[in-house]
Image (cartoon, rainbow, N blue to C red):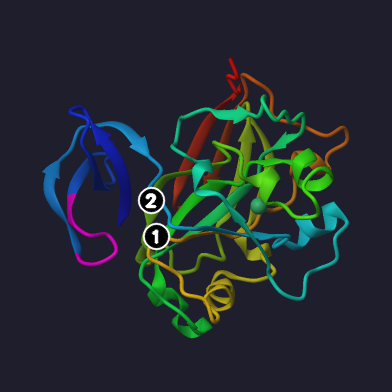
Amino acid sequence: MKIVRYIDRNGNTGYAAQQADGTCERIDGDIFGDFEATGDTVEIAKLLAPVVPPAILCIGLNYRKHAAETGAKLPDYPVVFHKSRNALLDPGEPIELPGFLPSEEVDYECELVVVIGKRCKNVSRDNAFDCILGYTCGNDVSARDWQKKKGGGQWSRGKSFDTFAPMGPCIVTPDEIPDPNKLPIRTVLNGKTVQESNTADMIFDVATLVEFLSGSTTLLPGTVIFTGTPEGVGMARTPPLWLQPGDSVTIAIEGIGELTNPVQKEKTG
Ligand code: ZN
């Protein structure tokens, strides 16, 4: 099932199941419990980020070729950091380049995002998929100056500005994605492909990440895991490629869909 969260023309928020022909059927129930598509067609006015997560966990340096392009050695354990929930952004809404606390080095990162489906702890690799509601696309937008030079040695500042966690367009359930580590993934900036890889290049695969992140740690329903980005980020290019006002950035993952956001400057007035 492809699950979307939406606002209809009357301003009501809900979940729906997107059909192959693009129409959407209202979902009854709790997507973190029992739910079903009702057969009632809904008129969607706007798509929302498919979940409002209680936590946004992220993994750094999780693709072999990306670790190589940054000059980092392969990590022995997953490199975990958190993004703030305030950074959540709906499909189609603008990524804002920070102006009040200015950044000149805002970058894109296409990522497969895992949505945890139920409260869980100490999950083994073998049982990891029982805890996953599904998968969506994410853009781990990163202000490299605040991440690398002005972040005090850790990454949260540069990764947590408002609008820095676009997610969507839908959650695809595991029955449609039997192996999340075999998915073509790319970023398209203004029509040009700038990242193109496959989730098979991950150092720590999805099941390993669920085992690691749930170790001695409760994961709540709706928690999302940004699983890292492949090579091709703007920071590693010569010259570097930073997001600019007027840009359009699309994250595309085969079997899930496309997440597109325009870029603008933060309005500070
Ligand atoms: Zn990332």
Name the residue type under label 1: Gly
12 drawn magenta = no
Do the residues under discs 1 and 2 have CB atoms within 8 angstroms?
yes
**Residue 31 colored in magenta in the image:** yes
Camera sees residue 254? no
Between discs 1 and 2, the one toward the N terminus? 2
x then y, percent, for residue 135: 44, 58
The quadrant holding residue 57 is bottom right
* Residue range (magenta): 27-34
Quadrant housing residue 60: bottom right
- Residue 87 left/right relative to 74: left
Residue visible at 37% across and 62% down in the picture? 176
The answer to whether the residue bearing label 1 lies less than 8 angstroms from the nearest atom of ligand 1 is no
Q: Looking at the image, can residue 220 be seen?
A: yes
Q: In this view, does 132 lie to the left or right of 66?
A: left
Q: In which quarter of the image is residue 13?
A: top left
Residue situated in front as seen by the camera: 33 or 54 = 54
The foreground one among 3 and 53 is 53
- Viewer-side residue, 112 vs 78: 78
Residue lying at 80% horizontally and 54% vertically, measured from the top left: 153
Residue 51: mark in rendering: 2
- Asked if residue 267 is positioned above or below residue 200 in the image, the reply reads above
| SS at badge 1 | loop
Q: From what the image shows, is residue 80 above or below residue 146?
A: below
Q: Which mark is residue 222?
A: 1
Q: Which residue is drawn at 68% across and 70% down?
A: 78
| Mark 2 residue crowding within 10 angstroms, few (<14) / some (14–19) / many (20+) | many
Amino acid carrying label 2: it is Val
How many numbered discs?
Answer: 2
Question: Could you tell me which secondary element the residue under label 2 belongs to?
Answer: loop
Estimate the x, y position of residue 144 in percent, counting from the top left: 76, 41
